[in-house]
Amino acid sequence: MKNDPAPNPTLDAMLAAQRIAFAPVMFQVARVMRNRGVLKALQRAGRSGRTPAEVAQDTGLSAYAAKTLLEASLSFGLVECAGARGERYTITRVGLIVENDRMTRINMDFIHDVCYEGMRHLDEAIDEGKPAGLKVFGEWPTVYEALPALPPQVRESWFAFDHLYSDSAFPEALPAVFERRPRTLLDIGGNTGRWAIQCCTHDPDVRVTLLDLPGQLEDARVNVEQHGLLGRIMGTPIDFLDHGQAFPTGFDAIWMSQFLVCFSEADIVQILRRARAAMGDGTALWILDTFWDRQANEVAVHCLHGSSLYFTCLANGNSRMYSAADIKRCIDEAGLTIDAEIDNLGLAHTLLRCRRRDVGG
Ligand SMILES: C[S@@+](CC[C@H](N)C(=O)[O-])C[C@H]1O[C@@H](n2cnc3c(N)ncnc32)[C@H](O)[C@@H]1O
């Protein structure tokens, strides 16, 4: 029996470093293996696997393309060699996840369609504190002004990514937010109206006001109309970066979902102060967000750290995926107190309930 080679930490580190060096190639190979049906063909073949010639036949790829992709995928962990002479390829557990896992698919599409080209401009983005990668799509100060005008595929991948995470947490957040039966709710950064529509479905008496940029409010209006909720959900345009613009007052609850992540820490404090100024004595401010120091496993932490640089290079140039510790400091600076928190909602969220510090608990 062959002995396992002695552990060699330097060689392991060299391999990890080469995985970084070739990561963009690995990424594109995995994406093409998925999109061109190679992974599907291997999954169907099961343990018996397929030869490169059979994969070429299954997928319509040339023999050269099938062989090149399969050989590279050996090193990238998507496939293994099987058969007496190692001439057949089988799909690995990683390959199965790339092919079938929804989150992986949405993350890969987001990285390819939204981030891939722009990430070349990361140096410029960190030097200037601007989303320098956004110029691959056009000239806008942030991705949020760009959203209505982005190419359809880019928009689709952006919304799929945004919705994947928030959709997973909304159903679990609803009972907490509606425990005290708010009659009016201000949805700050309400985007396409998904949360507002779920609120109105959950509670027939609630009315929701969305604050967002005009382009997003137009998308929201179409969705709200489709759900027959125009009488209960309304939109008010705003630029949250104009700190002179006060928020409307008189709401039982204020809601911010995956929102603070779009701003620098200095802007977050200003925005929270404006929210505080709009809060009555009984108003609850709810913050639903993904904090990398609150995750149940390494997979979620990796996704959040990976997404962080999208904010730097494509979205706005000055925000990131925050830790709960950073956001709690901003909440405190804004004169607010957290009176309830729930971790592990949906895929990766924490829900914070805040009140004005000057109001008794
Ligand atoms: C990441 S999305 C989150 C959307 C939604 N709340 C959710 O949970 O899916 C952030 C939202 O904030 C809005 N937003 C970002 N910057 C803004 C600004 N300066 N003024 C107005 N809205 C802004 C965006 O248009 C977008 O709808």
Image (tube, rainbow, N blue to C red):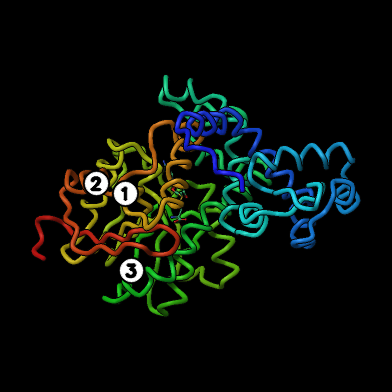
* Image spot of residue 180 (x, y percent): 26, 75
Which amino acid is tagged 1? Asp
Place residue 358 in its image quadrant.
bottom left
Which badge, 3 or 2, is on the more N-terminal residue? 3
Tag 2 and tag 1, C-beta contact below 8 Å: yes
Mark 2–mark 1 Cα distance, whole angstroms, equals 8 Å
- Label 1 crowd bin: few (<14), some (14–19), many (20+), radius 10 Å: few
Q: Nearer the viewer, residue 95 or 295?
A: 95
Residue at disc 3, CB closer than 8 Å to ligand 1: no
Q: Nearer the viewer, residue 88 or 189?
A: 88
Considering the numbered disc 1 on the image, is that residue within a helix, a strand or a loop? Answer: helix
- For image coordinates 79% across by 48% down, the residue present is 36
Mark 3–mark 2 Cα distance, whole angstroms, equals 30 Å
Which amino acid is tagged 2? Ala
Considering the numbered disc 3 on the image, is that residue within a helix, a strand or a loop? Answer: strand
Residue 293 circle label: 1
- Label 2 crowd bin: few (<14), some (14–19), many (20+), radius 10 Å: few
* Image spot of residue 346 (x, y percent): 43, 64
* Image spot of residue 62 (x, y percent): 89, 40
Tag 1 and tag 3, C-beta contact below 8 Å: no
Please give the residue where the numbered disc 2 appears in the rendered image: 325
Please give the residue where the numbered disc 3 appears in the rendered image: 184
Residue farthest toward the bottom in the current orientation of the protein: 204
